[in-house]
Image (cartoon, rainbow, N blue to C red):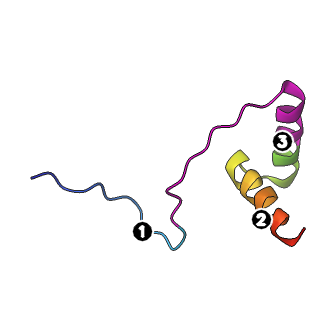
Amino acid sequence: MTKPKIGRPTDDPKPFKIDVRLSERDLSILDDYCNRKQKTRPESVREAIRSLKDK
């Protein structure tokens, strides 16, 4: 019997993963934003997705 994987406990689990292909221009825009806001790529993408809710 193997033990289940145990990671850090979280109130906001993220079980879904997506892959996205970006152009060099789009990646540059994302990286510039991340550098200015001191955020990671995933944080910035999640923020952008959440902003779609109000549109």
> Residue 6: x, y in percent?
32, 59
- Residue that numbered label 1 is attached to: 9
| For residue 4, above or below residue 17 | below
Element class at badge 1: loop
User: Residue at left 81%, top 47%?
Assistant: 34
Q: Are marks 3 and 1 in contact (CB under 8 Å)?
A: no
Q: Does 25 lie within the magenta span?
A: yes
Residue 42 as seen in the image, left or right of residue 34: left
* Residue 43 occupies quadrant: bottom right
* Sooner in the amino-acid sequence: mark 2 or mark 3: 3
* Sooner in the amino-acid sequence: mark 1 or mark 2: 1
- Residue that numbered label 2 is attached to: 50
Q: What is the C-alpha distance between the residues marked 3 and 1?
A: 29 Å
At label 3, the amino acid type is Leu
User: Residue at left 63%, top 38%?
Assistant: 19
At label 2, the amino acid type is Arg
User: What is the span of residues highlighted in magenta in the rendered image?
Assistant: 13-32
User: Residue at left 84%, top 54%?
Assistant: 37
Disc 1 vs disc 2: which is toward the camera? 2
Q: Residues within 10 Å of mark 2 (few under 14, many from 20)?
A: few
The tag on residue 30 is: 3
Disc 2 vs disc 3: which is toward the camera? 2
